[in-house]
Amino acid sequence: MRQYELEIHVENDVYLALHYARLLMNELGFSEMEKQKVLVAVSELTRNVLDHADGRGSFLCEIIGGHGLRLVVRDWGTGIERLPEILHGEPSHNRRGLGLGLAGAKRMMDEFHISTSKEGTEIVGIIWKGKAPQSRRG
Ligand SMILES: Nc1ncnc2c1ncn2[C@@H]1O[C@H](COP(=O)(O)OP(=O)(O)OP(=O)(O)O)[C@@H](O)[C@H]1O
Ligand SMILES: [Mg+2]
């Protein structure tokens, strides 16, 4: 199977999402470092659905182009306020942890797109197998 999708409602769904991402990364032959990066991103993004969107969301992971892993995390919360500041690492008022989850997840991925509004949020992240680590900085 090249694609997995599940709803994110409770803590255990985070672990299921991590498990599915791992299955596809094993299929793709990702390096240990690539796997760790993706697992951090999956964990931070799915946890945000529980922490900030009332546990009303979904997770999808799929293999694309034969050597990429695409993640889509959607929710039906009230959207991310002050997104530019958050991505610059400024702490937000209603943070749960260090408040670097989203900025960290972005750094882990080769491509990262956020669409957010008062109706909810969709985050798409892609990591390509074998892409040089230097080109992921920034
Ligand atoms: N899916 C989301 N829906 C609504 N707001 C969100 C969502 N994800 C993040 N946010 C907002 O962005 C802020 C920053 O998120 P981020 O994951 O970086 O930090 P955090 O969740 O507060 O703390 P940490 O991830 O370190 O536990 C959150 O405090 C929250 O205000
Ligand atoms: Mg977070």
Image: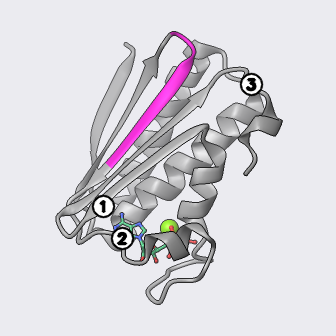
Say what secondary structure mark 2 lies in: loop
Q: Report the number of discs.
A: 3
Q: Quadrant of the N terminus?
A: top left
Q: Label 1, label 3: how many angstroms apart (C-alpha)? A: 32 Å
Q: Position of residue 83 (x, y in %)?
A: 45, 70
In the displayed structure image, the side of residue 105 where residue 133 appears, left or right = right
Q: Which residue is mark 2?
A: 80
Q: Secondary structure at mark 1?
A: strand
Q: Between residues 64 and 48, which one lies in front from this camera angle?
A: 64
Q: Which mark is residue 65?
A: none
Residue at x-position 73% and y-position 20% = 130
Mark 1 or mark 3, earlier in chain: 3
The circle drawn on residue 116 is 1
Residue 113, above or below 94: above
Is residue 72 inside the magenta stretch?
yes
Q: Are marks 3 and 2 in contact (CB under 8 Å)?
A: no
Q: Which residue is mark 3?
A: 31
Q: Is mark 2 within 8 Å of ligand 1?
A: yes
